[in-house]
Amino acid sequence: MKSSGKILRSRWNLARVISGLILKVIGWETRTISLDFPKFILIGAHHTSNWDFVIGYMVMTAIGLNFRFVGKHTLFRWPLGGFMRWLGGIAVNRSLSTNFVEQVASHFQEQDQLIVAIAPEGTRQQTDYWRSGFYYIALQAKVPVVLGFLDYPSKTGGLGAMFHPSGNLEKDMEIVRDFYAGVHGKYPEKAGIIRFQPRA
């Protein structure tokens, strides 16, 4: 995994301009917070529709983020595999027992600037638990977690809050739950429960 270069695209970057125009046409607005950190984990919720990726990618591009994203390995098969990698995708096979957290955390240590986007629900269907990988990557790499969102009722998306993992899992997850309590996906009934599965 290589660094994505500057954390923000130029205001006149073609992809940024096109994304902003498309969002304006379909009625979406962007909102963001001050980005004072060159490296962070970006999470997005709630993931309830295939449209989340399309709109979310345009929102983050319109804001100006240069980011990589983690996706299921099945999304990287022919014929879309090359395109997904060109967009910045990182294929992950979550069915395998791998040191995913350690691998991604080590890249943060090696790069001066890096943003990795992860959908912690891991599926468009309602789930009882979020995947905890994003939290432990941020904790190990000593980088903040930025909370990205798509609120379909208001057609607003962007970056809404940030926190530094403290190691106190329950306390940190309260920050996440409080923020996303006011965010509604395209299909709210499919939103995953914001909690991690207890460790054995």
Image (cartoon, rainbow, N blue to C red):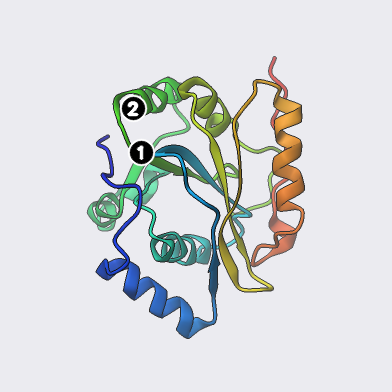
Q: Quadrant of the N terminus?
A: top left
Inspect this view and state whether residue 194 appears. Answer: no
Q: Name the residue under label 2.
A: 107
Quadrant of the rendered structure where residue 150 is? Answer: bottom right
Quadrant of the rendered structure where residue 171 is? Answer: top right
Quadrant of the rendered structure where residue 165 is? Answer: top right
Q: In which quarter of the image is the C terminus?
A: top right
Residue 99 falls left or right of residue 171 = left
What is the three-letter code of the residue carrying label 2?
A: His
Q: Mark 1 points at which residue?
A: 114
Residue 71 lies, in percent from the top left, at: 42, 45
Residue 17 lies, in percent from the top left, at: 33, 73
The answer to which of 29 and 134 lies nearer the viewer is 29
Residue 198 lies, in percent from the top left, at: 72, 23
Decide: is 62 above or below 173. Answer: below
Residue 24 falls left or right of residue 165 = left
**Are circles 2 and 1 on residues that touch, CB within 8 Å?**
yes
Residue for point 27% across, 51% down = 81
Residue 24: mark: none
- Label 2: state its secondary structure: helix
What is the three-letter code of the residue carrying label 1?
A: Leu
